[in-house]
């Protein structure tokens, strides 16, 4: 049976020593939060996820959700775990105190989210969607809607769902057909079918609030004619108590590859009462608030799975005895050496470790900007942080989930045949991880977002939020001989990224397929360069700490960084070549010749 131990030491290293808490905790809003409080929250989150959520992960996968008479029952123990989650105040963590939230910063919640995802990815979807929905409602809803629904959403008493996808439209939401008919009393009646709706129906909460995109009768075709509606499962009376059942029902559950304890529902809206959220025809814009929150959340799902897969693969590699070290017997008292002695096993473990720890630094770096964007009183700082979050959101979503799938597969490989057998739990990680590359906009679509929207936005303004700090860092360290083995590879990868950026921008002006053809490779090149920069910062900190009492940890950081720079980052060279080879090899072959 797999295990999980929250990596609190590494989380504190990243937050406190590499990224630093100063910029966030010095803001007046967070004046009462200090490092000890952050550590206390992490420690408690570790206890909760390790002892309450993780033990349900395998049984939840085996049992799955069940559907009967339009209601959904979650696997044994899940409802009780959710009640404990609510009692522990976890849904309220970052919520606005005006509506009953604790108002803690994202630098805390991003990390606790990683723990929840590591311990039980399927469980994480239920509160994750509610959180995204409440952020969106707070930003775009009327005061009346906010007062009525937000406090219970933030408490976790009511849940949220996000209803976008229809049978004929997923990526291209402009095709959607769900109708919203205006009523004399200012409400709307929604009719249509949504598929693949996570948490569309379940037994965790007394009410579920569906955030649905639909088209009013006179709406323009395509994306511009879409509006957003709040459709409660149970109507809510003026005094806040629940009224009659609304006509939105779960018609069935999807049978799927992984995250089986997460209810993925087909939802029928049959003249269901809905309330407009924000302005008419601004539905996609408003929904993007939720989607962007969810995209960062899905990135954390990726990191969570990658971390737990690594932890278990490491335990196995230490325990399993097979063969002898190539350089001679290492454990003569045992019938064979542990897997750890084999270079290929170490290659796989270090690939996982260096990418996971790098991704954790990236996620915390972005969450720092999320806090500044939301809470800074300085408009310039706020705008810069917003630009950085915009730029990095597709990278976090796509790269961290690619790392998860690759890492879960490496984990299986380290277990050999046992990785393929259910009881060890590794194959569940691979099945669970896979969806994260698909939902919330596929990773291909994230790459298009980076290259087509974020890269050219405001003539490269978003890009500057990454390029400028890296340039300044390289300049400051150009004569740092102690760091040369790390700075050199970063400088090369960064040069390739700069050249690729200019190359694509130039070529795409004449032919948009050039951007489409380069997108996925460009996103990966960008992500690896960002990780290289953060690994340099981690090495700098670690070098200064050696000799002060935790040398295993800091030496380990430097060696992991060395592995990353020499064994992973060279991919930047092939990615660069692939990018520069252009669109012709993809586009010249007529469709008919595909066979
Ligand atoms: C388990 C699960 C849970 C989900 N939860 C939710 C939920 O809660 N709410 C919700 O609304 N939806 C949900 N979804 C739906 C999910 O977001 C969609 O499946 C996803 O957005 C992709 O849409 P699609 O499946 O229709 O694929 P398509 O849009 O048909 O895409 C198929 C392929 O074509 C590519 N592609 C499509 N368009 C383009 C383009 N313009 N350029 C380049 N490539 C393109 C895609 O990248 C993909 O590889 C869920 C799906 C699953 C399986």
Image (spheres, helix red, strand yellow):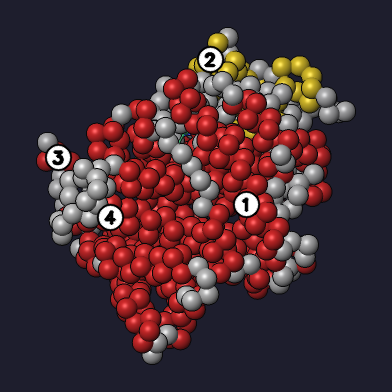
Measured in 3D between alpha carbons, the distance from the residue under mark 1 to the one under mark 2, in whole angstroms, is 36 Å
Task: Give the image location of residue 65, x and y in percent.
Answer: 51, 20
Quarter of the image for the N terminus: give it.
top left
The circle on residue 594 is 3
Dot 4 falls on a residue whose secondary structure is helix
Between label 2 and label 3, give the one nearer the viewer: 2
Circle 1 residues within 10 Å: few <14, some 14–19, many ≥20:
many
Q: Are marks 1 and 4 in contact (CB under 8 Å)?
A: no
Q: Which residue is mark 1?
A: 42
The circle on residue 563 is none
Q: Earlier in the sequence, mark 2 or mark 3?
A: 2
The circle on residue 67 is 2
Task: Give the image location of residue 314, x and y in percent.
Answer: 36, 48
Between label 3 and label 4, give the one nearer the viewer: 4
Q: Is residue 250 left or right of residue 186?
A: left
Task: Give the image location of residue 563, x and y in percent.
Answer: 31, 65
Dot 2 falls on a residue whose secondary structure is strand
Between label 4 and label 2, give the one nearer the viewer: 4
Measured in 3D between alpha carbons, the distance from the residue under mark 1 to the one under mark 4, in whole angstroms, is 29 Å
Q: Is residue 196 above or below residue 505?
A: above
Circle 4 residues within 10 Å: few <14, some 14–19, many ≥20:
some
Q: Earlier in the sequence, mark 3 or mark 1?
A: 1
Q: Which residue is mark 4?
A: 346
Q: Are marks 2 and 3 in contact (CB under 8 Å)?
A: no
**Visible residue check, residue 148:** yes
Q: Earlier in the sequence, mark 3 or mark 4?
A: 4
Q: Is residue 340 left or right of residue 174?
A: left
Dot 3 falls on a residue whose secondary structure is helix
């Amino acid at each position: 049976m797999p295990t999980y131990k929250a990596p609190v030491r590494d989380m504190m290293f990243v937050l406190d020593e590499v990224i630093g808490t100063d910029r966030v905790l010095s803001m007046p809003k967070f004046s009462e939060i200090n490092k000890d409080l952050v550590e206390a929250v992490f420690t408690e989150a570790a206890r909760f996820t390790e002892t309450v959520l993780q033990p349900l992960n395998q049984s939840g996968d085996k049992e799955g959700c069940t559907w009967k008479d339009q209601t959904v029952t979650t696997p044994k123990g899940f409802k009780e775990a959710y009640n404990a989650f609510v009692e522990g105040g976890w849904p309220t963590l970052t919520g606005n105190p005006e509506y009953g939230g604790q108002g803690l910063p994202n630098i805390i919640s991003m990390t606790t989210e990683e723990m929840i995802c590591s311990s039980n990815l399927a469980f994480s979807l239920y509160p994750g969607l509610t959180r995204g929905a409440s952020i969106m409602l707070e930003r775009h809803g009327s005061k009346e809607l906010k007062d009525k629904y937000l406090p219970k959403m933030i408490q976790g008493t009511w849940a949220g769902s996000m209803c976008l996808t229809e049978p004929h439209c997923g990526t291209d939401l402009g095709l959607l057909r769900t109708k919203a008919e205006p009523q004399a009393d200012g409400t709307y009646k929604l009719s249509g079918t949504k598929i693949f709706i996570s948490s569309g129906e379940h037994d965790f909460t007394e009410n579920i609030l569906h955030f649905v995109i639909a088209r009013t009768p006179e709406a323009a075709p395509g994306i511009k004619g879409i509006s957003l509606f709040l459709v409660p499962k149970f109507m809510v009376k003026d005094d806040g108590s629940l009224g009659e059942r609304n006509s939105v029902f779960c018609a069935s559950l999807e049978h799927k590859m992984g995250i089986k304890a997460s209810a993925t529902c087909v939802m029928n809206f049959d003249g269901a009462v809905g309330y407009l959220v924000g302005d008419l025809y601004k539905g996609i814009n408003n929904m993007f608030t939720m989607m962007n929150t969810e995209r960062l959340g899905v990135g954390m799902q990726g990191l969570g799975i990658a971390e737990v897969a690594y932890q278990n693969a490491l335990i196995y590699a230490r325990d399993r005895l097979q063969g002898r070290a190539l350089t001679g017997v290492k454990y003569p008292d045992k019938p064979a050496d542990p897997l750890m002695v084999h270079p290929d096993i170490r290659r796989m473990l270090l690939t996982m470790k260096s990418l996971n720890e790098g991704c954790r630094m990236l996620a915390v770096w972005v969450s720092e900007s999320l806090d500044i964007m939301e809470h800074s009183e300085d408009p310039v700082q706020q705008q810069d942080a917003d630009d950085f979050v915009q730029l990095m959101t597709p990278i976090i979503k796509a790269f961290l989930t690619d790392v998860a799938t690759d890492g879960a597969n490496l984990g299986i490989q380290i277990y050999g045949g046992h990785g393929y057998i259910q009881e060890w739990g590794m194959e569940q990680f691979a099945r669970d991880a896979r969806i994260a590359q698909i939902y919330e906009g596929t990773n291909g679509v994230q790459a298009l977002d980076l290259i087509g929207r974020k890269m050219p936005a405001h003539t490269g303004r978003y890009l500057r939020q990454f390029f400028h700090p890296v340039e300044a860092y390289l300049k400051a360290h150009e004569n740092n001989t102690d760091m040369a083995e790390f700075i050199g590879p970063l400088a090369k990868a960064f040069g390739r990224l700069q050249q690729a950026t200019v190359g694509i921008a130039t070529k795409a002006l004449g032919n948009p397929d050039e951007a489409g053809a380069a997108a996925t490779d460009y996103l990966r090149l960008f992500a690896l360069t960002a990780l290289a920069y953060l690994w340099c910062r981690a090495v700098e900190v670690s070098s200064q700490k050696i000799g002060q009492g935790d040398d295993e940890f800091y030496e380990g950081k430097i060696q992991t960084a060395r592995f990353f720079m020499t064994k992973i980052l060279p991919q930047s060279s092939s990615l660069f070549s692939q990018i520069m080879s252009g669109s012709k090899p993809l586009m010249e072959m007529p469709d008919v010749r595909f066979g």
